[in-house]
Amino acid sequence: MQRAIAMVLCVCWLVGCTTSPQADSKEKLTSTVMLYYANMDETKLVAEAREVPKAEQEKFMRDVMLELIKPPTKPELKRVFAPNVALLNMDVEEGTVTIDLSDGFDAQNILTRYAIIKTITALPNVAKIRILKNHKPIRGRNGVIVQAMGKEDLVDSAPPIPTDQALVTLYFAQLLNQQWVLKSEKRIIAVKSEEPREKSILLELIKGPKEREFTKTMPSGTKLISVETKEGTCFVNLSQDFVGKQNGNVQEKEMAIYAVVNALTEQVDVKRVQFLIEGQKMSNYKGDLVFNEPFERNTKFIHK
């Protein structure tokens, strides 16, 4: 009898040991992640905590990315993706995550790229992020392909440029060893969403250089009438002054043309430039250069 009671007590103890933890506690089914969104001024990124269901690594990363594409829950934050952006694919290989986004993704928006990198590299075993747009590598404002980046590549002391500004490369002339060359000048310019960036670039070229040793290439009085890019060709419509007040030699005329062409072709959507004067094509530029055909980028004039 005593032996039977002891066996019952032992069974009850074992059952109690195995069932009481389940009764007293529940396993958490989500993980807390930090998503990065823009502040209202779009001058910096701010973290927002979000609960994401637990899953195996690749699915969990994908779910986090889908959450980031959604709007933030805090009213003081702004989404970093346009509403029409979709996640096409996401792959992980040796610590590098490749994220393929749809055509709605603004590859030029540094704030959005930073948000992706800061969010996804905070996940376990992620070192670098490579971003694609519709299966193709994205390019920066200088036209160079953006390589895979990690959080160590983000410079927190220099926050991303606000989306109403852009870092552009302009070209101006300099006389070196009796030869005119083009020298680059980086400049942060104001841009408007309703206007093409090419317009802002041309207006800066008309203003002239900030560097003392550089020379303005646009003839005095030149005005921008209109600019439009279609299928890779940027149509630049300038006032008669661009021709009428050009009194330089052949080299100086080349500087005037290729300062415009090389600055505009820094933009990924511009492959060539067609000049118009008062809305019309002109056969030649002051008798020296063919002027009625599109000009493509020419780096031979650029002096590093």
Image (cartoon, rainbow, N blue to C red):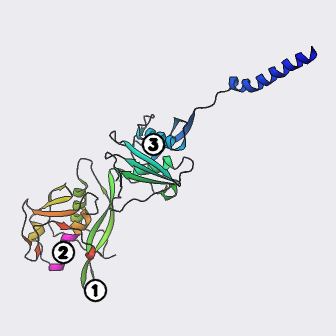
Q: Amino acid at mark 2?
A: Glu
Name above or below for residue 49 compared with residue 44: above
Near-viewer residue (61 or 45): 61
x%, y% of residue 34? 52, 42
In the rendered image, the residue lying farthest to the top is 1
Give the residue at mark 3: 65
Which residue, given by chain and number where applicable, does mark 1 sit on?
Answer: 177
Q: Quadrant of the N terminus?
A: top right
Main secondary structure of the magenta stretch: helix
Residue 211 versus residue 15: which sits nearer the camera? 15
Q: CA distance from mark 1 to mark 3?
A: 54 Å
Label located before the other in sequence (1 or 2): 1
Question: In the drawing, does residue 196 fall left or right of residue 128?
Answer: left
Q: Amino acid at mark 1?
A: Asn
In the rendering, at what x and y percent does residue 276 appear?
Answer: 11, 62
Q: Secondary structure at mark 3?
A: helix
Q: Assess whether residue 266 is covered by the magenta stretch.
A: no
Q: Can you say whether 50 is above or below 123 in the image?
A: above
Quadrant hosting residue 265: bottom left
Residue type at mark 3? Met
Question: Element under label 2?
Answer: helix
Distance (Cα) linking label 1 and label 2: 17 Å
* Residue range of the region highlighted in magenta in the rendering: 246-258
User: Nearest the camera: 80 or 103?
Assistant: 103
Could you say which quadrant of the image residue 228 lies in? bottom left
Q: What residue does disc 2 label?
A: 254
Q: 57 above or below 30?
A: below
Q: Residues within 10 Å of mark 1 (few under 14, many from 20)?
A: few
The residue sitting at 63% across, 30% down in the picture is 27
Left or right of 138: which side holds 68?
right
- Residue 164: horizontal and vertical position, in percent? 32, 50
Question: Percent x, y for residue 295?
Answer: 18, 67
